[in-house]
Image: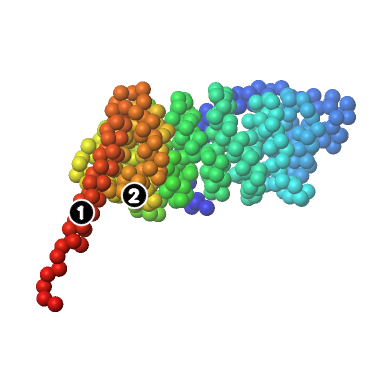
Amino acid sequence: MANVKDYIQMPNENIDMIAATSVLQQQAGEIRNKPINWASYMQSQMISPEDFQCITSLDTSKSGYMQANPSQSVKTLLNLLSHVSKDSTIQYILVMIDDLLQEDRVHVAYFHDYANKRKEHIWGPFLNLLNRQDGFIVHMSSRIIAKLACWGTENIPKSDLNFYLQFLKDQLTIHANEYIQSVARCLQMMLRVDDYRFAFVSVDGISTLVRILSSRVNFQVQYQLVFCLWVLTFNPLLATKMNKFSVIPILADILNDCAKEKVTRIILAVFRNLIEKPTDPQVAKEHCIAMVQCKVLKQLSILEQRRFDDEDISADVEYLTQRLQNSVQDLSSFDEYATELRSARLEWSPVHKSAKFWRENAQRLNEKNYELLRILVHLLETSKDPIILSVACFDIGEYVRHYPRGKHVLEQLGGKQIVMQLLGHEDPNVRYEALLAVQKLMVHNWEYLGKQLEKENENQKQTSAPITGKA
């Protein structure tokens, strides 16, 4: 579990929380002001006298009655959820439950205690409601699940957890989801718990956050999703793996465009954690290099000129500036190249065109089971960007030219066939670089053959030379 001290400096979320659930909160306010006629439910024998007495008392004095009668209160609320089918009534009950949990976290324990005594899990009734058609019911149930999962002493079981996190992930990806801020708010709560973080990663959660951040979303959603990445980085293992999902380039782009102070603050906090939290200094170094390549130093110099009310921003700007400047001094050309390649943002930086670089480093593309070469091949196969494709073709050609077994390795990885396919690419620059790469593949083949023939001729001369000397 991440150290609780890590969270002491978390931003005050009270204002953000209201904004984050604005649609839900607005609807909840309207629902609160439409009391239910419980007497009609009792007269039609849809609820028991006991439940009628309890729910009308809760209507009058929510928190006071629940503290005096915790077991009966939970029992009645769950009874009503399971026996009433009308959407407007279920909405009202859910608002009441959410208000009770929000008023005092002790009330979370009452729900867990009641379920445990019955040898049940409290999650069931609320997870079932996630399948309803009514958006308010779905997202208020989701909000209640998050509070029960995060504010009590009992963690949500693994199968229920995976179902819930998959639900949240899917909701994030729904186009123009009016409840997206509420979904993000639930994730902000859930990802503070270490066990929940790994479960979220296992349902491909980080990739989803990054994909949505790379699209156009409003600053509030930006803030919330970056907040989710931030709390994930408090775990050293996740901080180590984070940039494999291209988190640094995406956040650098947002930092470059953003005008909201709270978005700036949370991005800087993520960057700081990506340097401070990994236990391997090499990973921290790679993260620094990635930030340098994504022009973060330039943004930091601009931020230094601005005045911020939040002292944390100034402290983070100072820390990051120092670490990134130090990393620039230690930067080797191969470090720079490897980080650029891992970021999947190839451009015509000087290192690509340096013959000295390729003479000295071509063979290093074979390290870690051809990690960097595999990335190049993957970019050739998947990228739609003509610049990335052009640079990758050029690099493949230089690798083959400077590494004797390069052609064979490239064929094994399927790279030769992909380069050949790019000869027909619509972009003339891609076609040109692909043609050069193919020529290098062919020339290398002839050069290699020529050297083999020379070697064989030399061997023949040596074996046919007359034996001289005394017997």
Q: Residue at x 54, y 29 (%)?
A: 173
Left or right of 273 on screen, residue 181: right
Closer to the camera, 73 or 158?
A: 158
Mark 2 and mark 1 residues within 8 Å of each other at the beta carbon:
no
Toward the bottom, the furthest residue is: 471
Q: Please tell me whether residue 394 is drawn above or below residue 38 in the rendered image.
A: below
Would residue 118 be seen by someone viewing this image from the given angle? yes
- Going by the numbered disc 2, the residue's amino acid type is Asn
- Label 1: state its secondary structure: helix
Q: Which residue is mark 2?
A: 366
Q: How is the image coloured?
A: rainbow
Left or right of 448 on screen, residue 115: right
Q: Please tell me whether residue 114 is drawn above or below residue 464 in the rendered image.
A: above
Toward the left, the furthest residue is: 469
Q: Quadrant of residue 303?
A: top left
Q: Residue at x 23, y 50 (%)?
A: 453
Tell me the distance, in whole angstroms, between the alpha carbons under discs 2 and 1. 32 Å
In primary-sequence order, the first of circles 2 and 1 is 2
Residue 242: percent from left, percent from top: 43, 43
Q: Residues within 10 Å of mark 1 (few under 14, many from 20)?
A: few
- Nearer to us of marks 2 and 1 is 1
Residue 9: percent from left, percent from top: 44, 44
Q: Which residue is mark 1?
A: 457
- Going by the numbered disc 1, the residue's amino acid type is Asn
Closer to the camera, 207 or 403?
A: 403
Left or right of 417 on screen, residue 110: right
Q: Residue at x 78, y 41 (%)?
A: 75
Left or right of 35 on screen, residue 239: left
Any mark on residue 446, and which?
A: none
Q: Quadrant of the C terminus?
A: bottom left
